[in-house]
Image (tube, coloured by chain):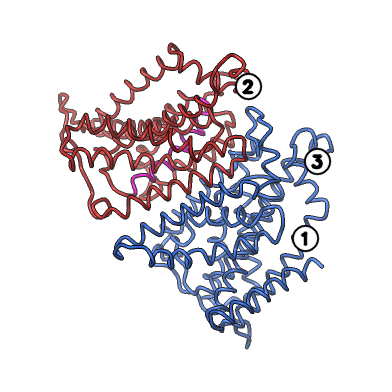
Chain colours: A red, B blue
Amino acid sequence: MLSLIQVLTSGIAIGCVYGLVALSFVLIYKATETVSFMQGELLMVGAFAAVALNAGAGWPLWLAAATAVAGMALLGAMLERIVLRHAIGQPHLVAVLLTFGLGLIMRGGLTTVPAASHDIYRLPFADRVLQVGALALSFSHVLVIAATAALAVVLAVFFRHTRAGLALRACSENARVASLMGVPVEAMHTLAWALGAGLAAIAGVLLAPITFVHLNMGLIALKAFPAAVLGGLTSLPGALLGGVFLGVVEALAGLALPEGVKDVVPYAVLMLALFLFPDGLSSGWRGRR
Amino acid sequence: MSLLRPALLSVAMIAIAVGVLGADYALGQATLVTTYAIAGLGLVIIVGQAGQITLGQGALVALGAYVEALLAVRGVPPLLSMPLAVLLGAAGGALASVPAWRLGGLYFAMSTLAFALIVEEMLVRWTSLTRGGAGLSVPAMAWGGLKADTPLEQVVVSVGVLSLVWLACARWMRGRLGRAWRAVREDEIAAAEACGIDVGAAKLHAFVLGGGLAGLAGALYAHWIGFISPEQFGLTFSFELLMLVFIGGARRLSGALWGALVIVSLPQLIALVRDALPGDSSRSAGLETMLFGAVIVLAVLLRPQGLASAAEGGRRRGRGRAPY
């Protein structure tokens, strides 16, 4: 029983990271109709930036993480202004290739840094254990879950109660009507990319204590696609919940199924979900739109 | 004549390459270009004709390559094993696209991507059959006393196969299938359904034929390279194939050949540029990746009309239905 709770906690924690990456993907997709295949690289660069500022420059961890996330948001906005703007209104293939190319540039650029390609970084609190009665939980797992929950609240407030959040939602619902209502649609596109990149960086910083920081940590973003599809590709809470669901399913599959099957479970779930619930899992209880 | 053009084009390219680079090397490269072009034709059908998107074509090439390799080792003649490779590629294409059948657009990207990742994991894990990451070595293509193991023989075989499938593709595109694909691409609801075109079936045909071509390319590739392992057919390969068809121009069959030429020669050009740049060899892998990414970005930015056909469809900002 205790070990089951531990497995579930680690599943939820990794699922939170899937969910955050899926959230960033869906946010960008909804606001700009642009498909991003570089969320994994944004995540990785964000985590590396935090590690570099912390271990390299000696900043305190919280400041390094905050600066890294802010820096990645700035990078996202810049990339939108310079490059990704050209993908708007184009077929998906244009955005897919553009973001894939930008991702390669980021990954390649980081590989040329010797310190990045040789070492695996772990954060100081990665091994701490939280003891609750007989239950021993990994501190980093609990931290990830708490941070994700807090972030979800912040995002909910942002999207419901702030001008920028409402404008962004209006822009996602119908760009033309939003622009007639005075929403600066182009600025919203930039904001969406900044938020998307920032969220990916947060996911990277949160993932850092779980899997450590290395060049392939961006591969985790592949599992954000099933999470986004489970949420119906257009729902922000759906993407987050889809991620958590996927993390739990994966953790349970790791218990019950032979080695190696666990890694394909998310993709099998994706194909099944598309087949059975084409509008996303939530459509099951919300009824047809 | 539709067949004359690619044949002349390939012969001319090969002749130039032989003159510049030396015979064996040039012929080897020409073999690769024609093999990539076969897979590219499949993408011309899926992306350029039917206006859909696929991210899993690399895995279908892998299926073809592994079928061919496993059968060739057991002495099955290519005339029997190649159709099986094509069949498995086609079946894979159907299986990968069926979940997104009713949704289309971006969902095809998701479902083919998931399929490709499953196939990749399977090739790595099913070690008793595929020997996993260690890879398989593939004997030369042989049938009775005939054998294709010199560069010249290989190029003759692949140009021959390319010409055959080129003819088939040209025929499909001219006929009922091609009209259905283009109607689906231009306007799924108004043009296609109003004309009584079965939209789902048209998409499925595109993915099945595209998958079959990928399987065929994989079967040839396995013989030419002589060694296959799962990592050759990863996600990057699927994206390379997408880039191939984007740069070449997805609307016309010749786009596959031009794109293949670019994709095969690009790594070598990049290696030349890398050697010209300062920095020691330990950084070279990262630099190559960076340059490759930069080429993709520049190609897309400078030639956004490379996919002019599909762009027309994409500019209609329809909500909910992913525009392609």
Q: CA distance from mark 1 to mark 3?
A: 20 Å
**Residue type, label 1:** Ala
| Magenta range | A216-235
Q: Which mark is residue A176?
A: 2
At a point 33% along the width and 45% down the height, the residue shown is A217
Q: Which residue is mark 3?
A: B197
Q: Residues within 10 Å of mark 1 (few under 14, many from 20)?
A: some
**SS for tag 1?**
helix
Q: Residues within 10 Å of mark 3 (few under 14, many from 20)?
A: many
Choose the circle earlier in sequence order: 1 or 3: 1
- Above or below, A254 against B258 in this view is above
Quarter of the figure that contains the C terminus of chain A = top right
Q: Which mark is residue B115?
A: none
**Residue type, label 2:** Arg
Q: Are marks 2 and 1 on the same chain?
A: no
Q: Which residue is mark 1?
A: B170
Residue A276 in the figure: left or right of residue A255: right
Residue A72 in the figure: left or right of residue B248: left
Q: Nearer the viewer, mark 1 or mark 3?
A: 1
